[in-house]
Amino acid sequence: MSSPWMPRRGVSPETSRLLVARAHDELVAGNLADPRLRDVRPLVRDSWRRAVDAFVGAEASPPVALTPEQLEEYRRRHPLADVMDMIRGLLIPGTPSESGVVVAVGDASGRLLWVEGDRELRARAGEMGFVPGTDWSEDAVGTTAPGTALRLDRSVQIRGAEHFNRHVQPWSCTAAPVHDPETRRLLGVIDVTGDEQAVTPQAQLLVDATARAVEGELLLARLRARAETPPAPRASRRPVVTRATLRVLGRDRALLEVAGDGAERTTEVSLRHAELLLMLAVHRQGVSAERLGELVYGDAEASVTLRAEIVRLRKTLQRHAPELVPQSRPYRIDAELDTDAHQVLSLLGRGAHRVALAAYRGDVLPDSVAPGVEEFRDTVRTTLREALLAEASVDVLLAYTDTDAGADDEEALRLALSMLPARSPKRSGLVTRLERLDEE
């Protein structure tokens, strides 16, 4: 089995890595005919070009594809859930939290469902968004072992600079697709991520063998079930559950996105309707008329005004998203309504600080003076800041200080300064900003 680098004759592996990195920079810059691209394996070069054609950003964060609730439900019914113990036993040696590798299992679309293994490595991988619920397909982040393995329907090894996304280039990974043992339909992908030990020939043999063992176990489980259980009546088609997202970060007028039954709808809603929908999303269990009046109008006695606005909201939703029409006693939305603000909080809880920061596009409904919105706005902003100050890497912390939220955050600036190496060229800029803040 050949090395993933395929270095030219007489060229050291380190020089070959540098050549690949330079070729990547030329490709991203649009120099598709640069001769240095010949130093890149055809498999990787073709994947890079697919990423460029799909307008994938070289530093883009992986999108959040599943909320925590969606992830939990989806994992419970996914075919690979029943073989996770086998995957752990084969790929995570010794004590899982100190195994030296990260093992990820994703679905056929490239969405990560499980990310397990070494505790320290998982924390570092979380910084780049390698967490359950995010999309690591080629169309989302470009060349990676799991995404490219799914695209090519074969096992793949991607080392360091071969990754299209610059944030992923410190890592190396091996991945293999998993198929339905009877129909051969793609079920998902198994990935091992770590240092160079994750892309040895032995690693590829092990990941391939694990994928085949999983397929064999799935077939045996089905045969046993058929032998023990009489045929069940043919089930009726399960309706597609509608999912909706209310985008309120950095927006005065929220954007309501609804997906279900293969269709997607997008509607802009007024500030007042956004406030009502947001409060119903925050209080998922339902809220009384008096409490909703306090949250939106600051007055528990505003029941008449509230009822009139709810009627207008229902009429709007009947036209654009009937699944989200609020119910009464208590006021609630029975369909699942997520918000981009809740997605940021979820990412922070999973340790994906870089992705959370990229997803934070500003304060929650910045023009709203509704008490409930102001409280939630402060919660999101404070949670983001505290998580970054406590756990984020220096690169993520620096990115935070370049946002409106962190530009004048003296504590964040001083912490970033203390984390930078003594000779870092970034120190002078931080010192200047701190001096300016002291003068003010």
Image (cartoon, rainbow, N blue to C red):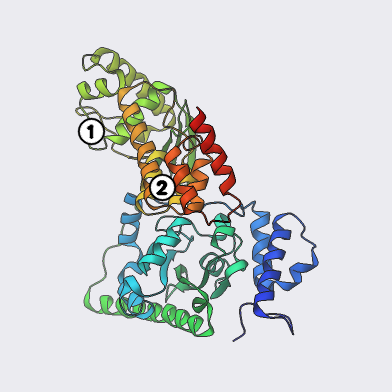
Residue 266 placed where, x, y %? Answer: 49, 35
Vertical order, 234 against 231 (above or below): above
Would you identify the image quadrant in which residue 10 lies?
A: bottom right
Instruction: Depth check: give the residue in front, 303 or 295.
Output: 295
Would you identify the image quadrant in which residue 131 lies?
A: bottom left
The quadrant in which the N terminus is found is bottom right
Q: Residue at x 68, y 75 (%)?
A: 16
Residue 358 placed where, x, y %? Answer: 50, 45
Q: Residue at x 30, y 61 (%)?
A: 76
Determine the secondary structure under disc 1: loop
Question: Is residue 267 something one can see in this rendering?
Answer: yes
Residue 241 placed where, x, y %? Answer: 36, 47
Q: Which mark is residue 286?
A: 1
Q: Depth-wise, is mark 2 or mark 1 nearer the camera?
A: 2
Amino acid bearing label 2:
Leu
Would you identify the image quadrant in which residue 206 lies?
A: bottom left
Q: Which residue was labeled with disc 2?
A: 388
Vertical order, 154 against 297 (above or below): below
Vertical order, 130 against 433 (above or below): below
Question: Is residue 184 something one can see in this rendering?
Answer: no
Q: Residue at x 37, y 64 (%)?
A: 114
